[in-house]
Image (cartoon, rainbow, N blue to C red):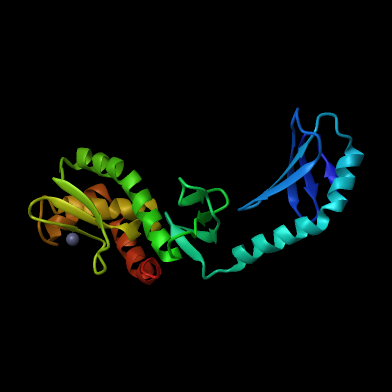
Amino acid sequence: MWAHKQLPGVISHPVAGEIKVKTHPRSKRLRLSFQLPFLFVLTIPPRTSEAKVHRFLVETEAWITKQVAAAQAIKGDSSREILFQGLPYQIAQQPLGKRDLYQIDAPAQIILLDPVGASVSQRIEYLCRKELKKRLPSIIEHYSQLMGLFPTKVAIRDTRSRWGSCSSAGHISLCWRLIMAPQEVLDYVVVHELAHLRHMNHSPEFWSVVADYCPRYKEYRQWLKANSRRLHAT
Ligand SMILES: [Zn+2]
């Protein structure tokens, strides 16, 4: 029914897929836990026999099936999907405790949102703003150094009509939704706004500065046009 690789280790199970097996020195009985996005962990006391593990997994099969069905229901709900750094992520709701309002599982492409006290779209905005805020300073720093152009202030906004803006005082604003776009696209918008520190217009001279630091900018402008609706869906 399933193949043992080793105990502890990983058991491949017909319903659960893989079950991670951990030995716990003080554990007295076998215990199976399941965490979203998709992780079964079986804790066993030291020197548990394979036969005992086998019996336990037969007894818990109904429970395993129920967990898998619930996880698939979340995954299958494609309306709960957002782009994050250019990749589609499934949104799942799960209480996460006091400190974390969200959790990003990059390998599984799943974002867990704590549903307590806010709507899904409010949580998504919170997460996008926070993640962009985390990444933006190093991107601005990188291109500022390269281009020799330094903004006096950088802000993250919900600019509905544009992806970014640059004022004559040297203030740059970027839309929080840009964290949904691929990294290169976000880089392009940064280069674009920094280039305005030299040319406050969209003249050929301006575009030539953009092209110097972002040679494929036309593709990225196209990406933003094509995906604008998707980025504004939240
Ligand atoms: Zn512009």
For image coordinates 74% across by 52% down, the residue present is 17
For image coordinates 88% across by 45% down, the residue present is 54
Apparent side of residue 118 relative to residue 74 in the rendered image (left or right)? left
Residue 188, percent from left and from top: 28, 53
Query: Along the line of sight, which residue is nearer the eye, 17 or 185?
Result: 17
**Residue 126, visible in the rendered structure:** yes
User: How many discs appear?
Assistant: 0
159 up-or-down from 166: above or below: below
Apparent side of residue 26 relative to residue 211 in the rendered image (left or right)? right
For image coordinates 92% across by 40% down, the residue present is 51
For image coordinates 45% across by 52% down, the residue present is 101
Query: Quarter holding the C terminus?
Result: bottom left
Residue 16, percent from left and from top: 75, 53
Residue furthest toward the right? 51
**Residue 209, visible in the rendered structure:** no
Query: Along the line of sight, which residue is nearer the eye, 194 or 203?
Result: 194
**Quadrant of picture, ligand 1:** bottom left
Q: Quadrant of residue 7?
A: top right
68 up-or-down from 225: above or below: above
